Image (cartoon, rainbow, N blue to C red):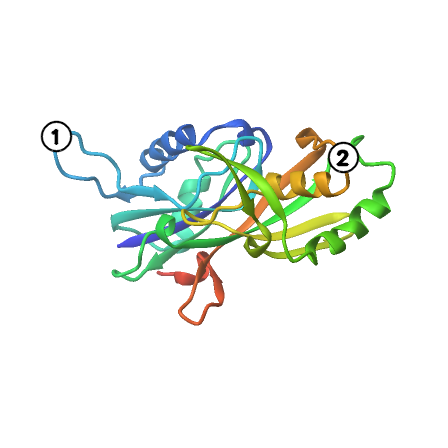
Amino acid sequence: MKIRIKFAKQGPMKFIGHLDIMRYFQKAMRRGNIDICYSEGFSPHQIMSFASPLGVGLTSNGEYMDIEVSGTTGSKEMTNRLNSVMVEGMKVLSCRRLNDTAKNAMSIVAAADYTVRFREGWEPEDADDFFSGLSRFYKRESIPVIKKTKRGEQEVDIRPFIYCLSVKDNTIFMQLSSGSANNLKPELVLEAYSNFRGEEFRSIAFQIQREELYAAQENGKLISLEDLGEDFE
């Protein structure tokens, strides 16, 4: 049985890198008595994959991992078992069953939601102008930036990969392209906006949180990775 697990990563856990999160969940599966399947061969390992690695320093309410299990007692029981062995800052939000032909989360991620707030004491003096200017920035036909790649640096127009950019109660909401093909980080959008304002970009000024991950349906609409599964008994 294929299971998709949604979890939150908050507090001090934001400083833990992706590889350590993988090792953490491997131990959590054993401690929570989850009947997870193992690969075959000389060095068996738990069948587990994560949707999209989260940058160090970012918090999230929408992280995903897929596992395969031989048997389980139901969505609620599995969630409770895992949460009973979670540490501060980690919380399993749901466990949902996927159909047998479902693709793993990593291969289908197409977009991500983010919220951005200023850290206390780092708000700009012209905060109203900062937030109102985002609308003008978003309406631009082209937003060229210098993006670093494995082959060096190249100029890229990131405007097509910004699906939504808005502000409410001094909180910035972004929906950006994500995944292996066109992955746009919120830090790059903020840096481009700082350049647009003629200011130096200070990453430390912002608190960034990932809220959700999406897959693209055949009709082009986005659906959360959680909604691709279903609760089970």
Callout 2 secondary element: loop
Could you tell me which residue is drawn at 41 percent across and 41 percent down? 82
Task: Count the labels in the image.
Answer: 2
Could you tell me which residue is drawn at 46 percent across and 49 percent down? 182
Establish if 10 lies above or below 109. above
Question: Closer to the camera: disc 1 or disc 2?
Answer: 2
Q: Quadrant of the N terminus?
A: bottom left
Between 193 and 116, the one lying in front of the other is 193
**With 161 as the anchor, is 78 left or right in this view?**
left
The location of residue 85, given as percent across then percent down, is: 43, 35
The location of residue 194, given as percent across then percent down, is: 72, 39
Q: Quadrant of the C terminus?
A: bottom left
The residue indicated by pointer 1 is 42
Establish if 227 lies above or below 167. below
Disc 2 marks which amino acid?
Answer: Glu
Disc 1 marks which amino acid?
Answer: Phe
**Quadrant in the rendering for residue 28:** top left
Could you tell me which residue is drawn at 42 percent across and 33 percent down? 151
The location of residue 207, given as percent across then percent down, is: 67, 37
Could you tell me which residue is drawn at 40 percent across and 62 percent down? 228
Q: Earlier in the sequence, mark 1 or mark 2?
A: 1
Q: Which mark is residue 199?
A: 2
Marks 1 and 2, how far apart at CA: 55 Å
Between 152 and 126, the one lying in front of the other is 152
**With 137 as the anchor, is 13 left or right in this view?**
left
Q: Residue furthest bottom?
A: 219
**With 57 as the anchor, is 102 left or right in this view?**
left
**With 104 as the anchor, is 157 left or right in this view?**
right
**Quadrant in the rendering for residue 89:** top right
For disc 1, the neighbor class at 10 Å (few under 14, some 14 to 19, many from 20) is: few
